[in-house]
């Protein structure tokens, strides 16, 4: 996406820059808290010349293309959080049945049951909203962007909260790399930042509500 004009959103044009184009290079892989299965690096353009034949659509259409892709991307990120959180909930149910403290399984403490109940409830609520938003994106509904933003915000926040509670239920073992939870805790954290931060999601929802 390159700026080709003055207007805040209308001056952006989409280009395909082939790998191997002189001036195109990539930074070193970033060292990250999580998401280590997916390499992240800067894309660097230095005096990179691109033929006009590589332009996608008309000049100035880039912002519209970028926005069109974002709703689906937000559903994807929300779904990643739901999947990670479901795994951690399942792990927590299994672990709390096995782990004995004060002469009984920790699953028998009411506090444990209440925590598991809240985790399952919040996860199902987030899943229901995410599926609704996905249906709206598929149907190209007029409110699809608001629903994608609401679903991304709720799924990623709820997902991280569920994983955090699962880590708590694992006690000290939850913090160890020998057990599965800490990796999900780190991997899901970035979902509140990626594909638009959750503050930006609130801006999209708030503006859309006030426009009506
Ligand atoms: C692992 C990883 C992979 C990534 N992969 C990609 C990729 O493939 N492609 C890509 O393009 N980008 C990628 N990114 C970048 C990512 O999309 C951005 O980090 C993200 O959109 C947030 O932008 P920023 O980092 O510039 O934060 P900033 O915009 O600087 O935000 C910093 C803080 O200020 C808040 N803030 C900013 N503006 C406002 C406002 N108007 N009102 C209220 N609060 C505000 C934010 O919510 C945040 O809390 C990746 C990032 C990471 C960590």
Image: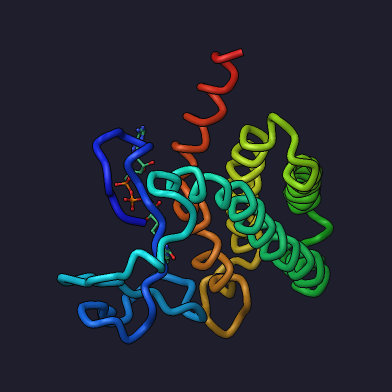
Of 34 and 197, the residue lying toward us = 197
Q: Quadrant of the C terminus?
A: top right
Point out the residue furthest to the left here.
47
Residue 52, quarter of the rendered image: bottom left
Up-down: is 9 above or below 130?
above
**In-image side of 158 versus 32 (left or right):** right
Residue 170, quarter of the rendered image: bottom right
Up-down: is 82 above or below 180?
above
Q: How many marks overall? A: 0
**What colour-coding does the image apply?**
rainbow
Determine if residue 110 is in view: no
Query: Who's the residue at 29% across and 33% down the image?
Result: 7
In x, y percent, where is residue 197?
A: 45, 45
Q: Quadrant of the N terminus?
A: bottom left
Query: Who's the residue at 40% across and 67% down the image?
Result: 53
In x, y percent, where is residue 192?
A: 50, 50
In x, y percent, where is residue 111?
A: 74, 48
Query: Who's the residue at 45% across and 37% down the image?
Result: 200
In x, y percent, where is residue 207?
A: 51, 22
Of 89 and 18, the residue lying toward us = 18
Residue 95, quarter of the rendered image: bottom right
**In-image side of 106 versus 20 (left or right):** right
Query: Who's the residue at 36% across and 72% down the image?
Result: 17
**In-image side of 151 versus 100 (left or right):** left
Determine if residue 188 is in view: yes
Up-down: is 47 above or below 120?
below
**In-image side of 46 versus 137 (left or right):** left
Of 135 and 5, the residue lying toward us = 5
């Amino acid at each position: 996406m390159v700026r080709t004009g003055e207007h805040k959103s209308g001056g952006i044009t989409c280009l395909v820059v082939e790998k191997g184009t002189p001036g195109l290079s990539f930074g070193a892989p970033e060292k990250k808290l999580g998401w280590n299965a997916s390499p992240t690096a800067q894309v660097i353009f230095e005096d990179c010349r691109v033929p006009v034949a590589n332009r996608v659509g008309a000049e100035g259409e880039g912002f519209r293309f970028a926005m069109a892709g974002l709703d689906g991307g937000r559903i994807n990120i929300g779904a990643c959080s739901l999947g990670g959180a479901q795994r951690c909930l399942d792990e927590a149910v299994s672990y709390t049945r096995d782990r004995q403290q004060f002469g009984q399984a920790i699953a028998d403490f009411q506090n444990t049951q209440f925590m598991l109940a809240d985790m399952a409830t919040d996860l199902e609520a987030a899943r229901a909203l995410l599926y609704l938003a996905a249906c709206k994106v598929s149907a190209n509904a007029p409110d699809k962007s608001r629903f994608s933003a609401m679903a991304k915000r709720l799924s990623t926040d709820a997902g991280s909260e569920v994983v955090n509670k699962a880590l708590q239920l694992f006690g000290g073992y939850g913090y160890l790399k020998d057990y599965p939870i800490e990796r999900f805790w780190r991997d899901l954290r970035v979902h509140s930042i990626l594909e638009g931060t959750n503050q930006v999601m609130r801006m999209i929802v708030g503006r859309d509500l006030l426009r009506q």
